[in-house]
Image: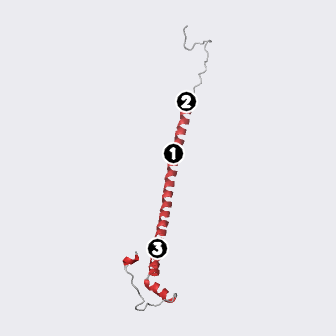
Amino acid sequence: MSYVIGGTRSDIRVVPRPAVRRPRLRWESLELLSTAALGVLILVGTLLYVWQHIHVVRLGYEIEQLRERQSALVQENKALRLELGQLRSLKRVEQIARKRLGMVTPKPGQVVLVPESAVQ
């Protein structure tokens, strides 16, 4: 069979093109998914950083409050030790013995010394 240019032939058929699959949709969805995953990772990283920073700031405030409390407790401890020293002083004990209990200073001869070996 020979074909002539410009000739007419009736047995020419139009064959439809086969449907072309679009693999680009698959790649586009993967690209969109990877972009979304990257965005989520960046968001999670940023949120973790912000949470950590806020946590550190809160701990800083808590540490400062605890230091102030410790300072107040140290001052209270010093005041209580001073008061304890004053309450234990022999001068105070003697005043209480004289005023409240009616005791007097012993006269010479009323004091009897006991040797330490006899105390055991």
Viewer-nearest residue: 100 or 78: 100
For the point 47% across and 79% down, the residue is 83
Q: How is the model colour-coded?
A: secondary structure
Kind of residue sitting beneath label 2: Pro
Q: Quadrant of the N terminus?
A: top right
Rendered location of residue 106, percent (x, y): 43, 90
- As helix, strand or loop, the secondary structure at mark 1 comes to helix
Count of picture labels: 3
Q: Quadrant of the C terminus?
A: bottom left
Kind of residue sitting beneath label 1: Leu
Provide the residue designation for mark 2: 23
Rendered location of residue 49, percent (x, y): 49, 52
For the point 48% across and 66% down, the residue is 66
**Residue at the farthest top position:** 1
Provide the residue designation for mark 1: 41
**Residue 97 got which mark?**
none
Q: Earlier in the sequence, mark 3 or mark 1?
A: 1
Provide the residue designation for mark 3: 77
- Gap in Å between the C-alphas at discs 3 and 1? 53 Å
